[in-house]
Image (cartoon, helix red, strand yellow):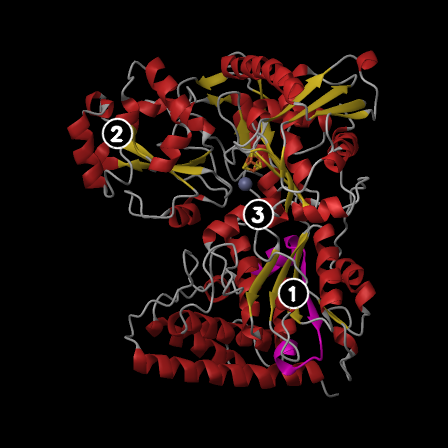
Amino acid sequence: MADIVADLTLSYAQKILAEAENRLQAASRKFAPEQKTEFPNTTYFLPIIYGLLGIEVRQLKDMEQALKVCRQILQDTDHPLKPVSRPLDAGLAAVFAEEIIEALNYVERPGMFVPGEEVSSENIWLGAADDLVIRRRGVEFVDGRVSGFAVILGAAPDRATAQKIAEHFLEKNLYVFMVGERRGQHFACQLQEAGLQLGWGARLVSFGPDTNSVVFPLGFATRAAMSFGGIAPGDFARILKYNQERIPAFVLGLGAVSEDWAANAVAAANYGFPTILDSELPGLPEAYRSIVITNVPHEKIVARALSTRGIKIKVARVPVPVSYGPAFEGERVRGEEIYLEAGGGKSQAVELLLMKSMDEVEDGKIRVLGKDVDRLKAGARIPLALLVEVAGKKMEQDFEPILERQIHHLLNYAQGVMHIGQRDIAWVRISRQAVAKGFRLEHLGQILHAKFHQDFGSIVDKVQITIFTDEAQVDGLLEEARGIFKRRDERLEGLTDEQVDTYYSCTLCQSFAPDHVCIVTPERPGLCGAYNWLDCKASMEINPAGPNQPVKKGRVIDPVYGQWEGVNEFVKKASRGAVQAFDAYGILRTPMTSCGCFECIAALLPACQGFMTVDREFKEMTPVGMKFSTLAGMVGGGNINPGFVGHSKFYITSRKFLSAENGLLRLVWMPARLKEEIMDRLIKRAEQLGESGLLEKIADETRAQTEEEVLEFLRKVNHPVLSLPPIF
Ligand code: SF4
Ligand code: ZN
């Protein structure tokens, strides 16, 4: 029986392969064979070819090797990614050729894509996600803020339908990845015309204008398997399996199906991503009915896509007149869009969450004291204080800062509300659009009331909120709040690893890095920086079967390197034997494993007898001879890498920072911006160590770029590392 999908796929695969060959020939006439041809800022080269075939396409001359594999697949030879008899693999051959074409676009058509995470006013096409984007966004998949991604091919019949579909996906916490066109229309352009912001922050990612750009989302998925799953490049079976099992994604084809779509749908099916079409595909054989769903009406297409891929979503109900969900977290409110602003240096804003006794809190009571939106003109700047009082039988004072920290994302989830900072440096903006839809200050309280009950119902029984906009009242609360913040800081700072007999595990990242376990101690937060010991303790109370389990320290094996019997046992079990033991306080022997979410990576600089550390934001070369992205590729995936360790920013100034190996006294290099960010704590910690001038003695990129230059600098400033005994 005729197989229309196979026919279309094969036909397209042949054509796109020929096109890639032609493009390569043409490029070879213009450029040297050594011309660089990787995607920007990545250690994964051309990620699909690298992941599935293990071929490192670095330069023009490496491309031929990948095209040769495509030819082999299509000729039904003995290549392991078998062949024509299985059209699925012809689909992959097509994708390899497309990836070559996109890489050539980077060489031959500079400016075709905008680098970074955000679109520009001239160009909306973002192209390949760099490693920074992958890791930052990967974390959202890990901790459940994101439910998956939809790859949209083509365009909706009109703008309004495009907007409806996109917003529906956003409300369901999915990323929307957009490629290709139909009838000269792009889905991304339709959204832009409808007034939506595009970019990674808005979760509406306009990858590229051609069908070829499907390689960007598939490359994203391929890299997830390598970086979070720790799967070796070339192990195509495991990479595809990882995606089938762990990456909730699908393709949505809007518009008439053509052979390029068929081939890419077939390629996506290898990853376990089904394709949902709004059109008919006449003659579709029965065998494809589970992976290609045809003729779905637009009103039902989102629900149908989610159910086909088995994505279940719990959507929060919050009584506000605007859309609400994590998708709106990254949305910004700027310039003309601002109706009302508080904080941000122009006025004072503060937020405080306090535990009260049960009879002091009236659940659901929300008061606005002072002017609300109706009495303010558009563009107003006001002082603002947000007081949240909670009561609960299982509530503890230690949970106050944890709940308080939720205010940031909970408010950001509202469409048209932007929230930055916390405590007395909070900064809130509310958009004109939101106000036009009926949003008032009271709704900030409604959000917090509803969400604290939903998300923290196990510790919070009652919530009441008071919002102040009167300057004198704001100042009054501010003073009280500052005293409380200070006491809280002292309490956490005073807590040492020795004082507690229980640490907490975090295995949140195992959904992506199956062998990884963070052990969180009072003096060593999780390497992502998002979970400290108190957070984990609270999270355990809130969700006893969750990812944070108590870990009894048990007998001390090594107090200097930080090894305990109970911890080792736990790690061994939680990693299913992959990791037998690790040092909590050292880098040289068996440091903790790293999943991929680390805020910073520390690395040994042997000639300096010290360490450097680099954070995710620093994109330049480091003295260890690798950029952050390269280091991250090496260190992530849940393995132990002596000499390298992922850690949080906070940990740098902890007393236990690599303390087995003299810690901060051996810190010889870090990016200037990071130094500045943690300066206050760094100075304080240096003083405790009796090295009050240490800050100035730590090199940064403005003083030294290579290890030799670091060493020279250390000698010049007489860094304390010079008087320490050799490290090995
Ligand atoms: Fe992942 Fe560790 Fe952060 Fe938990 S603490 S989310 S395991 S990096
Ligand atoms: Zn992680």
Q: Residue at x 52, y 71 (%)?
A: 80
Label 3 sits on what residue type? Answer: Gly
The span from disc 1 to disc 3 (Cα, nearest Å) is: 19 Å
Query: Is the C-beta separation of discs 1 and 2 under 8 Å?
Result: no
**Residue 299, percent across and down?**
82, 64
| Left or right position of 528 against 544 | left
- Residue 335: assigned label: 3
**Residue 652, percent across and down?**
41, 27
Could you say which is closer to the camera, residue 275 or residue 618? 618
Assign the C terminus to one quadrant of the image: top left
Q: Residue at x 50, y 77 (%)?
A: 78
* SS at circle 1: helix
* SS at circle 2: loop
- Residue 193: assigned label: 1
Q: Over which residues does the magenta segment extend?
A: 239-262
Could you say which is closer to the camera, residue 468 or residue 585? 468
Q: Residue furthest bottom?
A: 2
Mark 1 surroundings: few (<14), some (14-19) or many (≥20) residues within 10 A? few
User: Mark 1 or mark 3, which has the lower sequence index?
Assistant: 1
